[in-house]
Image: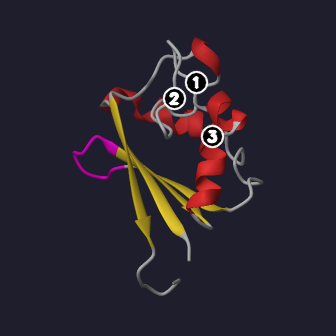
Amino acid sequence: MSIIKINAITVPADSGDELAHRFAARAGAVDGVDGFEGFELLKPTDERTTWLVVTRWRDEEAFEAWRTSPEFGHGHRQAGGGTSGGEAHGGAHGSEQRPVSTHAELWSYEVAGGTGA
């Protein structure tokens, strides 16, 4: 059964467009990764400043293999180095781009029911 990883990213109101742009620039970058099943970037439609990056994986092992891969490190480098465990900076390429978020949390779920389960 699939697992869901949600990166909840706090993005100042003036940085949302940049976050969306950075994700669009990397569209498809993870599509060929073994065990990857899908991705959505969810933009808040109310006063919230938390964007959600929702990914679906075959299993925890597939997610961890990607998270520890060189490709993940390359796509998630931030100014000053390091990675967040998710897309906290919007998929910056290298250290030339500033982070667009102020905080990120990685949430983990498994599908427990629904029409696609």
- Front residue of 27/105: it is 105
The CA distance from mark 1 to mark 2 is 6 Å
Q: Is residue 73 visible?
A: yes
Secondary structure at numbered mark 1: loop
Q: Classify 108 as above or below 85.
A: below
Instruction: Name, please, the residue furthest toward the right.
Output: 32
Quick one: label 1 or label 2, which is nearer the N terminus?
1
Q: Which residue is disc 1 drawn over?
A: 77
Q: Which residue is disc 3 drawn over?
A: 68
Q: Which residue is disc 2 drawn over?
A: 83
In x, y percent, where is residue 43? 40, 49
CB under 8 Å between callouts 3 and 2? no
Q: Which span of residues is magenta-colored?
A: 44-50
**Which residue is located at x 41 percent, y 58 percent?**
108
Quick one: label 1 or label 3, which is nearer the N terminus?
3
Secondary structure at numbered mark 3: loop
